[in-house]
Image: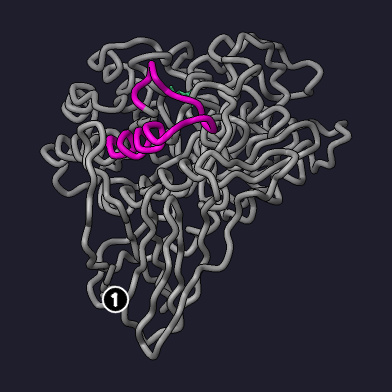
Amino acid sequence: MKIKIDADRRGGKISKYLYGQFAEHLGRCIYEGLYVGEDSDIPNTNGMRNDVVNALKELEIPVLRWPGGCFADDYHWRDGIGEKSKRPYMVNTNWGGVVENNHFGTHEFFELCEQLGCEPYICGNVGSGTVQEMRDWIEYMTFDGDSPLANERRKNGREKPWKLKFFGIGNENWGCGGNMRPEYYCDLYRRFTVFIRDYGDEPVYKIAGGPNADDANWTETLMQNIRNCTSAISLHNYTHETDWKHRGMAADFDREGWYGIMSDAMRVDENIKLHSAIMDRYDPEKKIGLLVDEWGTWYEVEPGTNPGFLYQQNTMRDAVAGMLIIHMFHAHSDRVRMANIAQMVNVLQAMVLTEGDKMLLTPTYHLFKMMKGHKDGTAVDVCYDKKEYEFKGRKVPKISISATEKGGKITVSICNTSIDEGDEITFETDKSVSGVTMYSENMTDCNTFDEPEKIKPRNADITSDGGAVTVKIKPASVTVLTLE
Ligand code: AHR
C-alpha cells in the first residue's frame, strides 16, 4: 500500500495526556503491584517496588489517576494519612470485599508520582463523601500557608504543598458512584465545586463524572447544567469481545474473538463522536475537554483468580486494539484532552503483571513505549487507502496510521488489525527511517512468568532505495517508524 506523509499539512497538538494511566485500589494493582511496604523483601523505595517503578518510568507517564474508579466514591482520605499502624481498616466492597489497610494513602500516592515523574490526578468522593471532606482534602494537599490542615500535612512529613492540577468530582456517579440521575449529579457537582479552592499557582482543572459509553442524556444534562463550572467531563468506554455479558478470555480466543475486539474497539470512536457533537452545541469553542479517563479491554478474569480482582492476560490483540484506539484519541484531540488506560498494574489491560517478586511487561506496555515519540507532537497528514472490513455491523480499518512531528522528527504508527493479511507500506521521504515492530507467532501468545519475553518489539523490516521506503507489515502487528 502506498502512503503519503505530508509534513506540510499539520493538524492539532497531540497532548501527552492521551497517554495517561489509572491505578485503583482494586485487586493487586496498588498492593503487591506497586506498593509492597518498606519492610518487604521485594526491593523497594519507600514501599514502592523498584522493578515495577523502573519499568514504568521508561514509559514517561504524563499523568496517573487515583484512587478509583468505583473505589473513589467509597474512599475517605483521612483514613489514609498519619502513622500507618494507626490507620483504620476498611472493606473494599467494590472489589472482592477484601480488607484494605489504608497503608497506601495520599502521601504514598504523591511519592509514587514523584518516583514515576508524572502528574497526579485525584478523583474525589461524591457518592459517600461530604463537601467538607473534599474541600479539606484539597486544602490539606495544596495549601502553603499556616492552617490546621496544612500543618497536619507537615506533621505527617510533607512540608511543602503538592502540585495538584487534575481533580475529579466523583466517578461513574450514574452507577457505583451513587446511582444518581444526571440532574441530581449536576446539583451536587455545582455545590461541591464551589468548595474546591485554588490554593496553588494554577487553578484546579475540575473533571465532572461523565457518561458511560453511549449515554447521550448524561452528557446533554451535564452540558446544560454545569458547563460554566467544569473544565472537563470524563467518558468511560471499555472494549469486550461482544458485549459486557460476553467479554471473552484474554488469551483464549478464536478468529471471532480477535475481530470481535477490533469491532468493539470502534465503539470508542462512535462514542467520542456522539458526545463531542453534544458538547459542540453548547461549547463550540471547545473549552471543555472530554477525558476518556477509563478505557481498555475487559475480559473474564484468569481462571482461579478472584473475580473481584479483574486480573487478565494480555496478547497482541490488546496491543493492536490499543493502537487503534489511541489513533482515535489522536484524531479527536481537539476535544479529547486526556485518556487513562485501565489499569497500570495487574488489573484489566495492564502494562505490568506481577507474581511475588517476579514481574513481566505486557504487549500493551511495549506499545506504550513504542508510541512515546507522539507525545506533544503536532499531527501530520497521512494519505492512504483506508481499506475497511465489516464485522458485527461495524466497519474496521484494516490498517490504521497516525503521524506526528516534533522537533523535526516524524513518528508514524501503523497497526494492522487483520490476522489474515500482512501488508507492504511504501512511501517517499528524504529523511532516514528507522522503526520497531511487534507481532507474535500465534494470536493467543502472551508473556508469562516462565516466558516473559515471548512478545517484544524488534527491528522493523525496512528497505530504502533512494527516497523510496518499503516497510513490511506482519498480520496482527503494531509498527512505529521514526523519520529524522
Ligand atoms: O476499572 C475498573 C472499574 O471500571 C472502575 O472502578 C469503574 O470506574 C469502572 O466501572
Label 1 lies in ligand 1 vicinity (Cβ under 8 Å): no
Estimate the x, y position of residue 246 in percent, counting from the top left: 39, 19
Give the magenta-colored segment's residue range. 242-267
> In this picture, is 424 found above or below 30?
below
Q: Could one spot residue 217 in this view of the protein?
A: yes
Q: Nearer the viewer, residue 328 or 74?
A: 328
Q: Nearer the viewer, residue 255 or 88?
A: 255
Which residue does the image show at 81% across and 18% down from the upper left? 85
Please name the amino acid that badge 1 sits on: Ala
- Report which residue position mark 1 lands on: 7
Estimate the x, y position of residue 17 in percent, counting from the top left: 43, 50
Which residue does the image show at 52% across and 36% down from the upper left? 349
Q: Nearer the viewer, residue 319 or 56?
A: 319
Residue 26 painted magenta = no
Quarter assignment of residue 309: top right
Quarter assignment of residue 423: bottom left
> In this picture, is 159 found above or below 481?
above
Q: Could one spot residue 202 in this view of the protein?
A: no
Quarter occupied by the N terminus: bottom left
Estimate the x, y position of residue 51 in percent, counting from the top left: 75, 46
Which residue does the image show at 40% across and 36% down from the upper left? 255
Residue 256 painted magenta = yes
